[in-house]
Amino acid sequence: MEILIHVRSLQLGDNNFTGHLPQQICLGGALENFTAMGNHFTGPIPTSLRNCTSLIQVRLEQNQLRGNITEVFGVYPNLNFLDLSSNNLYGELSQKWGQCHSLTSLNISHNNLSGIIPPQLGKAIQLHQLDLSSNHLLGNIPRELGKLTSMFNLLLSNNQLSGNIPWEVGNLFNLEHLSLASNNLSGSIPKQLGMLSKLSFLNLSKNEFVESIPDEIENLLSLQSLDLTQNMLNGKIPQQLGELQRLEALNLSHNELSGSIASTFADM
């Protein structure tokens, strides 16, 4: 282990490594970049990462890592990228992620996380991508996420989230991809989503949304894909949907909608 004391960068990605990751990988407190993605590692996240404040990038996705991550991570002033996706991790999201003010990408999708999305995440103001999809998260989407105005990917699909979409999501004016599919979300689709002029992909399918599709959808001039299938939407389909020049995929099936779609989309 002495050989690892002063290591700053350890790259093990895309191999056939097995076994456990070394628990004292950051024993010397110098580790900045740690990549072990795309292997067959099992066991827990290394315990020494908790106080490894030198970290800048960590990529451990696509392994078979296990264990409770609730208290595994600390506060990292320089960390900008963390990917733990596609493992077998469980536990709850730490409030401390909101204190990682350099963090631009946080991906813990395709694991077994439970509990709520901590509102404190709204303090990680540099976040560009937040992917927590395919877990077992509960509760509401925190309105504090509306403070993350640098966000371009917000992916929360395939969880057990409930309640309304907070109107503050309309403040994410850089958002390009919003996926909230396969949850238990309800209420109406907020008209504030029409403020997301850069939005290309919007997926709200397989929820419990009611009322009509807001007319403000016509403002989404960058929209390429819209999926509202399997909700309880009613009323007339906004005519403006057919006038969105970039729209390539539209799925409104399994609702109670009426009306027709303008010829622009029908002729594509």
Image (spheres, rainbow, N blue to C red):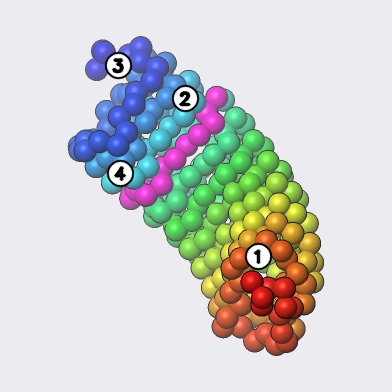
Percent of width and height locating residue 54: 48, 20
**Does the CB distance between marks 4 and 2 fall below 8 Å?**
no
Neighbor class of circle 4 (other Cα within 10 Å; few <14, some 14-19, many 20+) is: many
Residue type at mark 3 is Leu
- The Cα atoms of the two marked residues, 4 and 2, are separated by 20 Å
Residue type at mark 4 is Asn
In this picture, which residue range is highlighted in magenta?
A: 78-90
Q: Is residue 202 visible?
A: no
Give left or right: position of 78 versus 45: right
Give left or right: position of 166 versus 21: right
Instruction: State which tag comes first along the sequence, 4 or 1.
Output: 4
For disc 1, the marked residue is 247
SS of the residue under disc 4: loop
Give left or right: position of 48 versus 159: left
Residue type at mark 1 is Leu
Closest to the observer: 115 or 260?
260
- The Cα atoms of the two marked residues, 1 and 3, are separated by 52 Å
SS of the residue under disc 3: helix
SS of the residue under disc 1: loop
In the image, which disc is placed on residue 63?
4
- The Cα atoms of the two marked residues, 3 and 4, are separated by 22 Å
Percent of width and height locating residue 18: 20, 38
For disc 3, the marked residue is 4
Q: Is residue 86 magenta?
A: yes
For disc 2, the marked residue is 55
Closest to the observer: 207 or 45?
207
